[in-house]
Amino acid sequence: MTRQSRDQDIQALVPRLVELGVTRAGQGWLLGLSVRRVRRAAQGLSVGPLTQDQRTRVGLLERICHALEPWDDARAWLACPNAADPFAGHSPIELAVLFGIPALVVIDQVLTSAATTDTEGEIHELAGDPDAPPTDQ
């Protein structure tokens, strides 16, 4: 992967995170970048070289954002505290900020599991949303 393609990946990811309600500081924590570097990406500028950790975060966040695209309430789902396992009372975004890559992997797994079903309510059920429509199981 070239530096230009990594920059383009981050430049495309930052607006998606903004749409999901993630602040610049939150974007920095999630991406493992300084707020200054996140701002550079938002301006279409190079963020410089990335570590393996940062590249892993970018890849996971791209997958998570892509998985959330079909859901109208993705922003609310990310921000709401969730009693269901594995969230233990944290919102998915809070869990990701607190625990980094392991939490991003778990969130990606939850969303991947939800995407394998045909029922939109499944994401809510997996996430412990009490207002979720029932699913056939």
Image (cartoon, rainbow, N blue to C red):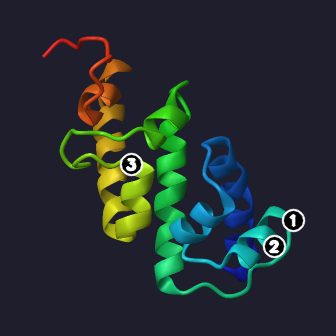
Q: Badge 2 is on which residue?
A: 40
The residue shown at (55%, 24%) is 72
Give the answer, above or below, for where 33 lies relative to 30.
Answer: below
Q: Badge 1 is on which residue?
A: 43
Q: Secondary structure at mark 1?
A: loop
Q: Badge 3 is on which residue?
A: 92
The answer, for residue 119, to whether it is visible in the render is: no
The x, y position of residue 133, in whole percent, is 31, 12
Q: Secondary structure at mark 3?
A: helix
Which callout, 3 or 1, points to the residue nearer the camera? Answer: 3
- Marks 3 and 1, how far apart at CA: 27 Å
Q: Quadrant of residue 116?
A: top left
Position of 117 with respect to 101 (left or right) is: left
- The residue under label 3 is which amino acid type? Pro
Give the answer, above or below, for where 73 lies relative to 137.
Answer: below
- Marks 1 and 2, how far apart at CA: 5 Å
- The residue under label 2 is which amino acid type? Arg
